[in-house]
Amino acid sequence: MSPAVPAAAQPAPAGRPAPDPHPVPHPSDARTILDRCDELAAVSSTHHGITRVYLSPEHARVNALAAGWMTAAGMTTWQDAAGNQRGRYEAAEPGAPAILLGSHLDTVPDAGRYDGILGVLLAIAVVERLHRAGTRLPVAVEVAAFGDEEGTRFGTALLGSRALAGTWDDAWWQLVDEAGTTLRDAFTAFGLDPAAVGDAAPPRGSVVGYLEAHIEQGPYLLEADRALAVVSSIAGARRFELTMTGVAGHAGGVPFHRRHDALAGASEVVLAVERLARDADCVATVGRLEAFPGGVNVIPGLVEFSLDLRGEHDDRRDEVWAAVREAAAEVGERRGLAFAAHETHSAPAVVASPALRDVVRDGIAATGDTDPMVLFSKAGHDAMAVAELTDWAMLFVRCGNGGISHHPDEIVTLADVAVALDAFEASVRALAERSR
Ligand code: GLV
Ligand code: MN
Ligand code: MN
């Protein structure tokens, strides 16, 4: 007998929200958010699915859409020196420090329509509510729609939020995309001045805290039948480009005892990655693997593959990486292959600021869930980068479809978006009062 699947976990028709079983407190604001998610989903570099990368024509188009919604919400807007779309809703006293809200508008290849995007649109909707009510807070509210969180184009993630946090690394200018374009040239082609990237960072002391709303990208809220959670911390992540080099040869002519098959060796490494990470309570993924020269009758002489490695504790994660390297070296020695690794991304684990975590918890409590769930995030978020600039906290919103994400079937319900907006607005108002 197949196991029972809760109704909420059933797949919805491709790409569209499922009918909503829950009552909706503020349908019109939540509806606007979901309609905007659909509008952004139409901006893709591919005909099927959604793919939108940093400093692309699609990036410029979603920035323009977000700028229009920010303006309608009473904000002044600008595209910052790293291509992030920014907006500011002025405080009662013009020029006061700001609460920063944000998330990202870029995507993984063949993405869903809510990862990052929902957080940006919830942030704009909070400001829209303040504007509609004629409310000016003791602090300003700024929204950042980050241009790169995923790292899809240049391999290094969080480029947008790291620019805002003032932690840009000049070594990144030499990063190249698949077409061989450097990050420096991509900046220029987008109309940005590489020399001015530091201007994306606000002056120290001008930001009182950062709040980010995001879909959970996992099943825990769904399984607990809860709509919202407060995030305790975010896993540290490292990414690598790996190569296994052997000797190409004739698939018929070379007997097994004379082979140096790079793909057979890389396959052993992939399985070691899974075993070692699982044993250490970390997560690791080989998401891309390519064998060369790629002929059906040619023994692979070279394999390029990626590794994404995450853990709640950086030292445990780093021990897994050391063990993977050891396993790969052993495979290489046994099979006569050369293993090499190049790190493309590294971000330490971060813990939410207790005071802001309480603000988000109280925001959720204001919607009726008086003992909100607390979740640790294995997914990375812009908050990891902004943590270098200011205190931070995050609100998680339940995903449907078993919690699937980085997949076109990513889904949220109208009711959950409505309650998330209420909780996020309450959090922003409470943080503003605390910052008075
Ligand atoms: C971002 O979505 C990541 O966690 O890879
Ligand atoms: Mn993502
Ligand atoms: Mn995201």
Image (tube, helix red, strand yellow):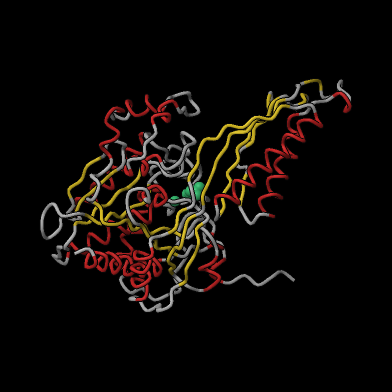
Q: For residue 242, which quarter of the picture?
A: top right
Q: Where residue 341 sits in the image (x, y, percent)? A: 61, 32
- Report the residue at 76% width, 31% height from top: 332
| Closer to us: 273 or 6 | 273
- Report the residue at 63% width, 35% height from top: 305
Q: Where residue 150 sits in the image (x, y, percent)? A: 46, 43
**172 on left or right of 194:** right
| Closer to us: 275 or 330 | 330
| Closer to us: 132 or 86 | 86
Residue 62 seen in the figure: no
Q: Residue furthest front?
A: 315
Residue 16 seen in the figure: yes
**264 on left or right of 111:** right
When the figure is inspected, residue 403 is found, relative to residue 244, above or below; the finding is below
Q: Where residue 295 sits in the image (x, y, percent)? A: 72, 25
When the figure is inspected, residue 72 is found, relative to residue 358, above or below; the finding is above
**78 on left or right of 288:** left
**130 on left or right of 50:** left
- Report the residue at 20% width, 45% height from top: 77
Q: For residue 158, which quarter of the picture?
A: top left
- Report the residue at 77% width, 35% height from top: 331
Quarter that holds the C terminus: bottom left
Q: Where residue 106 sits in the image (x, y, percent)? A: 41, 43
Q: For residue 268, which quarter of the picture?
A: top right
Quarter that holds the N terminus: bottom right
